[in-house]
Image (cartoon, grey):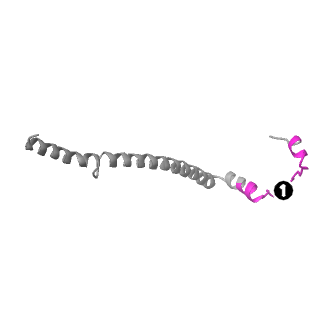
């Protein structure tokens, strides 16, 4: 093999090295694309959660229905003039006598 051919082959190999393994090379781009995909999934979940929170905030700002619902179910509050009735069943009767809306 003539020396010029050997030198050109070595130079070609040196030029290819950064393309495949160097900074900004194929491996680096593949790793970054994988990270990007993962981050996009996380962002989509967080965006959905933020939209839920924004909806709750809108409900609380615009009307009293959401506040009333939370007060009833989370705090056990009743309106003035209402009577709170709670049915307590025995363990075996709870399933067969339960009335569902």
Residue 7 placed where, x, y %?
12, 46
Question: At 69% across and 51% down in the image, what residue appears?
Answer: 65
In terms of depth relative to the viewer, which is nearer, 66 or 36? 36
Residue 33 placed where, x, y %?
38, 46
Q: Is residue 72 magenta?
A: yes
Instruction: Point out the image quarter for the C terminus.
Output: top right
Q: Helix or strand or loop: what does disc 1 sit on?
A: loop
Question: At 75% across and 54% down in the image, what residue appears?
Answer: 73
Is residue 39 shown above or below 80? above
Q: Residue furthest front?
A: 1
Q: Quadrant of residue 84?
A: bottom right
Q: Quadrant of residue 26?
A: top left
Q: Is residue 89 left or right of residue 73?
A: right
Q: Is residue 65 left or right of residue 87?
A: left
In terms of depth relative to the viewer, which is nearer, 59 or 74? 74
Number of other residues with Cα within 10 Å of mark 1, as a class: few under 14, some 14 to 19, many 20 or more: few
Instruction: Point out the image quarter for the N terminus.
Output: top left
Question: At 68% across and 55% down in the image, what residue appears?
Answer: 67
Bounds of the magenta segment:
70-96
In terms of depth relative to the viewer, which is nearer, 83 or 47? 47
Question: At 78% across and 58% down in the image, what residue appears?
Answer: 76
**Prevailing SS of the magenta stretch:** loop
Residue underneath mark 1: 81
Q: Is residue 51 magenta?
A: no
Q: Is residue 37 left or right of residue 53?
A: left
Residue 40 placed where, x, y %?
45, 47
- For the image, the number of numbered tags is 1
């Amino acid at each position: 093999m003539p020396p010029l051919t050997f030198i050109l082959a070595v130079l070609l190999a040196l030029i290819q090295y950064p393309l495949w393994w160097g900074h900004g090379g194929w491996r680096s781009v593949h790793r970054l694309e994988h990270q990007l995909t993962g981050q996009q999934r996380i962002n989509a979940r967080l965006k959905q959660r933020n939209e839920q929170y924004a909806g709750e905030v809108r409900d609380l700002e615009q009307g009293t229905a959401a506040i009333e619902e939370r007060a009833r179910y989370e705090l056990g509050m009743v309106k003035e003039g209402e009577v709170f009735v709670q049915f307590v069943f025995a363990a075996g009767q709870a399933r067969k006598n339960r009335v569902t809306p």
